């Protein structure tokens, strides 16, 4: 009988915070710049340079902790994690081990079996290392611009059992963090990096298996493939009577396999001790209340409210809330025009289409809600028809054009001159007598041909409903 196995998964998620300066110095965190230009004696580990905690980092960590139902350590401190990497200038990292800022929280995810709570073991603050650059001449260079960029590390409990649950957990955390404005969480740019701790055990067993850690996965697809690949590898080892070695592994997404990097370190291997150059962080009740009071309405709450307040389908609500910026734009436009479904349709169809064509994200939308509301008003008043409105929307999307001015300057108002429409259509019917004969014979498509030709003659500016009705009247004679 084939053994059944259960996968046990925990996550370590590194999130780069959207502060303007680094965690312990005043150097810029702006992406880019010539190598080693966003540096100072503190973030390059020069002897005698003393760190000072960036208050904004603690505020961001608190905000994430409160949003994930964590307990707050009102007395927390930093520790030194000692290890050598070429891109780690001090040969140690300032992090938190013994008294992290947040602990014992949870997030709720949706699974096929219903809702499930995933525990958050702790959230701690730490600094990032630099970056190694390998050139074509087999030489490695170090750029310390990223050294000292502030991170929070979210450490989950081993509560997940599948790649789908991992994806749901990451998506939930990503939305929480993005709505807070703490980070953009772009995996492909490294502002969110995921380490997957995975073990397998026989189904029904209580004792955990030996886990491995796969480092720095930077896409949801890679995470899913890595989990499935590592699960198969560990099960095969156990089936062959071998043992799983506790180690850190690197997932090669191109080859579809992982390989060992080093044996897995324990806490004692890092020789942690209290950071002597930083004082403890004292978090008052008032500070916690201030951060809690500034928490936004999160995506889950928005989805429920959009269905009840605006009578939108759940599908619409889920699309509109994939970005806080998109959700804000939707709500602002609805306030101006009072037509939630119409606003939803424009954002979900035309805006999303143009974003996809231009390889942009919803957060890149930069037109004003006022102009979208004006466009909807022009359609409602029959100043322009919908085909024309789509071309006007492209001008709004690309240039934030004022639709009223754009329509006037380009002569796009609806042609309501029935005499002109009738004359144009009679000329088309005279040139295409077979169309009228086909229509009388029951071929509906014949009317569509005349409607299309009339719209083309009117340069798309006629009212399609009027043209359609007129075509049927004339062709029926």
Image: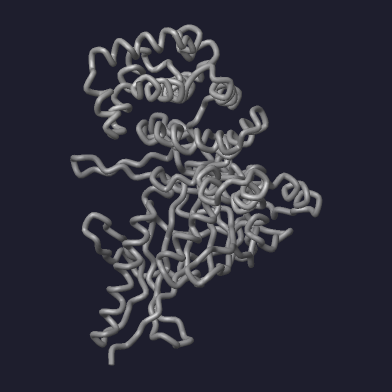
Q: Position of residue 401 (x, y in %)?
A: 50, 16
- The C terminus sits in image quarter: top left
Query: Going 35% across and 33% down the picture, which residue do you hit?
Result: 357
Query: Going 32% across and 79% down the picture, which residue do you hit?
Result: 244
Q: Report the label total.
A: 0
Instruction: Work out whether residue 421 or residue 309 is closer to the camera in this orientation and state it.
Output: 421
Describe residue 360's horizontal placement relative to residue 319 as left or right.
left
Q: Is residue 109 above or below residue 417?
A: below
Q: Does the image show residue 288? A: yes
Query: Going 41% across and 34% down the picture, which residue do you hit?
Result: 355
Outermost residue to the bottom: 1
Describe residue 68's horizontal placement relative to residue 82 as left or right.
right
Q: Is residue 430 above or below residue 469?
A: above
Instruction: Work out whether residue 368 or residue 65 is closer to the camera in this orientation and state it.
Output: 368
Q: Position of residue 234 (x, y in %)?
A: 31, 76
Q: Is residue 422 above or below residue 369?
A: above
Outermost residue to the right: 286
Q: For residue 134, what is the image quadrant?
A: top left
Q: Position of residue 216 (x, y in %)?
A: 39, 55
Q: Does the image show residue 148? A: no
Describe residue 295's horizontal placement relative to residue 448 as left or right.
right
């Amino acid at each position: 009988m084939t053994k059944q196995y259960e996968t046990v998964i925990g996550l370590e998620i590194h999130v780069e915070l959207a502060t303007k300066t680094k965690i312990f110095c005043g150097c810029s965190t702006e992406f880019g710049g010539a190598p080693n230009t966003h540096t100072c004696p503190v973030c390059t580990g020069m002897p005698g340079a003393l760190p000072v905690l960036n208050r904004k980092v603690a505020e961001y960590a608190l905000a994430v902790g409160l949003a994930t139902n964590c307990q707050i350590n009102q007395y927390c401190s930093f520790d030194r994690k000692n290890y050598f990497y070429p891109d780690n200038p001090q040969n140690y990292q300032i992090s938190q081990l013994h008294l992290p800022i947040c602990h014992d929280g949870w997030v709720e995810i949706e699974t096929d079996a219903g809702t499930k709570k995933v525990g958050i073991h702790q959230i701690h603050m730490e600094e990032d290392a630099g970056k190694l650059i390998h050139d074509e001449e087999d030489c490695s260079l170090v750029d310390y611009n990223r050294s000292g960029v502030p991170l929070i590390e979210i450490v989950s409990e081993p509560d997940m059992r599948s790649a789908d649950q991992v994806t749901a957990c990451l998506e939930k955390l990503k939305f929480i963090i993005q709505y807070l404005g703490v980070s953009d969480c772009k995996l492909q740019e490294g502002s969110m990096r995921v380490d997957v701790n995975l073990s397998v055990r026989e189904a029904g067993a209580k004792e955990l298996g030996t886990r491995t850690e796969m480092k720095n996965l930077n896409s949801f697809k890679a995470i899913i493939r890595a989990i499935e690949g590592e699960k198969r590898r560990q099960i095969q080892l156990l089936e062959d009577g071998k043992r799983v070695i506790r180690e850190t592994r690197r997932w090669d997404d191109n080859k579809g396999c992982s390989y060992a990097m080093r044996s897995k370190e324990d806490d004692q291997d890092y020789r942690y001790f209290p950071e002597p150059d930083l004082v403890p962080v004292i978090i008052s009740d008032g500070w916690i209340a201030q951060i809690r009071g500034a928490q936004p309405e999160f995506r889950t709450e928005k989805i429920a409210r959009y269905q009840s307040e605006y009578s939108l389908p759940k599908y619409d609500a889920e699309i509109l809330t994939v970005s806080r910026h998109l959700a804000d734009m939707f709500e602002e436009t609805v306030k101006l025009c009072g037509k939630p479904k119409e606003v939803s349709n424009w954002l979900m169809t035309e805006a999303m289409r143009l974003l996809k064509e231009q390889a942009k994200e919803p957060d890149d939308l930069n037109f004003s809600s006022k102009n979208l509301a004006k466009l909807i008003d022009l359609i409602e008043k029959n100043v322009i028809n919908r085909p024309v409105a789509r071309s006007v929307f492209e001008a709004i999307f690309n240039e934030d054009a004022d639709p009223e001015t754009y329509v006037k300057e380009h002569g796009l108002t609806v042609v309501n001159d029935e005499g002109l429409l009738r004359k144009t259509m009679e000329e088309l019917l005279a040139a295409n007598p077979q169309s009228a004969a086909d229509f009388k014979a029951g071929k509906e498509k014949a009317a569509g041909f005349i409607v299309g030709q009339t719209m083309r003659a009117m340069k798309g500016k006629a009212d399609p409903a009027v043209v359609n009705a007129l075509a049927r009247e004339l062709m029926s004679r």
